[in-house]
Image: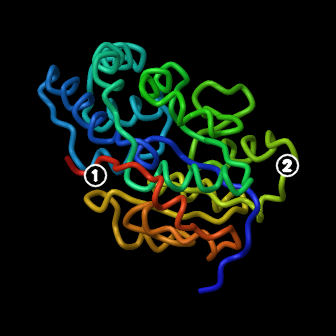
Amino acid sequence: MAFKPVTHCIFDFDGLLVDTERLYFKIIDDVLKEFGHRYTVEIKLMVLGCTRKDCARIVIDHCRLNITIDEFLRLMEEKCIETLPKCQLLPGAERLVRHLVKKGIPIAIGTSSSLAALELKTTHHGDFMKNFTHLVSATDDPEVAAGKPAPDVFLVCAQRFESPPQASRVLVFEDAPNGVRAALAAGMQAVMVPDPAVVTQDQRNEATLCLNSLEHFEPELFGLPPFDDEILSESPPLNPRNL
């Protein structure tokens, strides 16, 4: 398959750059236990890539909980404060990000995560986050009218580059089906790095390219500078996805 050359990259955050999905699974599961329910892969598939409020709404509706969205989010927040700072970078994330920055490729983050949650998740990753020119939160940014799978977060993010590119020149990296759909709806290409335990083959097929890890990404496929030996030798060891 022939891919179109790109000049800019936008990265999702959770489950793509940092290993937060297993942490969130435990957080939501712990909240649901208080109501006699358990968080399942089925529910996780429904909320992947959603904003915090949409996630809470879906979980509440699915489990028929007698609780408001704000109450559910408060319970989650209590557990997030302790848990989220423990997240680690996923395999290939730092290598790819450092490579693109070194080669002068503008990169940014377009995420459904709230700014408050991002602050917790990046507690130990401040230097890594400095690589990105900007970040757009679908939860908090007033210009993002709708969350993924709507294209808003990626369209807004692309327009905030110093020299905004055409949508077709942007490559989005995602782990969730809703994120892939948002990127495609924005007129961008989407590289998907899914959790194999929760994403179906049909959902994988929606992406422009599907990989098992960012470690396997070949920049030259999209007209980006290829990795060189120096970047490979500098790349530090990273934690695996499934610990």
Pick out the residue farthest to the right: 163
Decide: is 22 above or below 122: below
**Residue 221 versus residue 152: which sits nearer the camera?**
221
Q: Is residue 29 left or right of residue 6?
A: left
Q: CA distance from mark 1 to mark 2?
A: 34 Å
Residue 136 picture quarter: top right
Q: Which residue is at 72% across, 42% downward?
A: 157
Residue located farthest toward the left when viewing the structure as drawn:
36
Q: Against 113, is 93 above or below?
A: below
For residue 178, above or below residue 218: above
Q: Position of residue 154 (x, y in %)?
A: 68, 47
Residue marked by disc 1: 240
- Residue count near mark 1 (Cα–Cα under 10 Å), binned few <14, some 14–19, many ≥20: few
Of badges 1 and 2, the one in the foreground is 1
For the rendered model, the colour scheme is rainbow
Closer to the camera in the image, 89 or 208 = 89
Q: Which quadrant would residue 227 be assigned to in this image?
A: bottom right
Residue at 43% x, 63% y is 215
Q: Any mark on residue 164, and which?
A: 2
Three-letter code for the amino acid on which mark 2 is drawn:
Pro
x 57%, y 45%: residue: 148
Label 2 environment density (alpha carbons within 10 Å; few <14, some 14–19, many ≥20): some
Q: Quadrant of residue 43?
A: top left
x, y percent for residue 209: 52, 72
Which is nearer the eye, 57 or 121?
A: 121
Q: Secondary structure at mark 2?
A: loop
Q: Which residue is drawn at the image coordinates 26% and 28% (left, top)?
A: 27
Left or right side of 178 for 183:
right
Q: Where's the N terminus, which quadrant? A: bottom right
Question: Of the residues shown, which amino acid type is indicated by label 1?
Answer: Pro
